Amino acid sequence: MVVQSPRPNPRQNLGAGSSRGAADARANATRNANSRANPVRNGLRSRAGGNGRNAGEASSASNRGDVPLRPRPVSEAMRDCGVYVDGNRVPGEFDHRSALEEVKTRGEGFVWLSLSRPDATQMDAIAEEYGLHELTVEDALTHRQRPKVELHDDHLVFVLRSIHYSPEGTSQDHNEKIDTGQLLMVLGRNYILTIRMGMPSDDMNRLAERVDEDPELLQPGPAGVLWALTDLLVDNYLRTVQQLEDLVEDMEDEVFRPTYTTDIEDVYILKREILEMRHAIDPLTTALRTLMGLRGQLMPKVVRRYLSDVLDHQLIAADMVQGFDDRLSALIDAAAVKIQLQQNTDMRTISAYAAILAVPTALAGIYGMNFDFMPELHWEYGYYVVLGVMGVVVAFLVWLLRRNKWL
């Protein structure tokens, strides 16, 4: 596609501003000629201003006369690319172009392209090769999305979240135990793209090992990869939930321990992470049911049957996470009430000691006024009698307060 430079306005050639108008026209022509006329990229710029950041920076550098940024090749974001026929991987090394050509030449099989954090330039190249919709490219460049399914003419987009539990804390914050990532899958008739953001590579490695041990997992084609990855992530949900159950029970035991004196910060931090898990797990129910309702070549019947089992596991995990959220809410309320009761007990004890000291203080104050006409001041045994009265009253108050459990 050739981008023609705009025609200069004839009015700019009149008067003192003619030279400046001609210079502006030449600058605009240079910028348009140097820019890349990619409809996918242009659509992204108009729909999501931040997603074309790398391309915008390169264009700005060119306008300033600086050296433009070098576009990153797809290979830098590619983690694996393979061709699979009847569930078995075809020997050889492929890139995103040669793999698709191999499948078209064979007339069978599919491409599995795995990417990690691609940028706009890389996604443009992949979209041009695989015929992806511009909204698909936009989704691939957007992080922290809700689980969803989007249908396009010849492919679909499936987004889900990964969850990992770290007892020692995540790399970002040692107080946080749960880390979430994103996996986006683009499913076509003869390809599947898996794009991960913040998702550990261990999950993909485990799936690769399962595929090597049991090639029949990929017999249904690209939809088999979608099911296997979804099943793997949902199993991680269940493992994380089981680990969290022990943690929640330990917190309950700690809060209701008689000698509990700590604050509820740890409980609140865990509740916040449980809420993040709910945002990752709960919307997946609707997405899975959407996939199970699809008919056609993209989603074979056998895969829909397997997805129903995945949905059962996902619902179990969602129910348990909901239960954790409710238990932690009750635990925070119970801890707050317990702290309030402890404060009331402390205030009652302080009041009891104040009452005990009030009588000796009053008697000492009265007989410390040194009036001349106080009979007890000149009495031989007055000092001992006053001390005795103080002791008797204090002993009586201590007995009474202990009886009422104020001490």
Image (cartoon, rainbow, N blue to C red):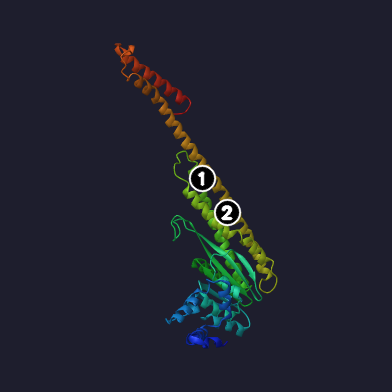
**Image vertical order of residue 54 relative to residue 268, above or below:** below
> What kind of residue is marked 1?
Glu
Q: Position of residue 381 (x, y in %)?
A: 31, 12
Tell me whether circle 1 and circle 2 mark residues in contact (CB < 8 Å).
Answer: no
**Image vertical order of residue 248 relative to residue 142, above or below:** above
Q: Position of residue 390 (x, y in %)?
A: 37, 19
Disc on res. 86: none
Q: Answer left or right for 142 relative to 392.
A: right
> What kind of residue is marked 2?
Val
Disc nearer the start of the sequence (1/2): 1
The C terminus - image quarter: top left
Q: Residues within 10 Å of mark 1 (few under 14, many from 20)?
A: some
The N terminus - image quarter: bottom right
Q: Residues within 10 Å of mark 2 (few under 14, many from 20)?
A: many
**Visible in this render: residue 236?**
yes
Residue at 36 percent across and 23 percent down: it is 361
Q: Position of residue 205 (x, y in %)?
A: 51, 69
**Image vertical order of residue 279 relative to residue 385, above or below:** below
Q: Check disc 2 and report the residue beneath it.
A: 321
Which is nearer the eye, 110 or 402? 402
Secondary structure under the numbered disc 2 in the rendered image: helix
**Image vertical order of residue 178 relative to residue 66, above or below:** above
View extreme (front): residue: 15
Q: Answer left or right for 389 relative to 196.
A: left
Q: Position of residue 155 (x, y in %)?
A: 64, 74
Q: How many marks?
A: 2
**Visible in this render: residue 217?**
no
Secondary structure under the numbered disc 1 in the rendered image: helix
Q: Check disc 1 and report the residue beneath it.
A: 252
C-alpha span from label 1 to label 2: 16 Å
Which is nearer the eye, 40 or 190? 40
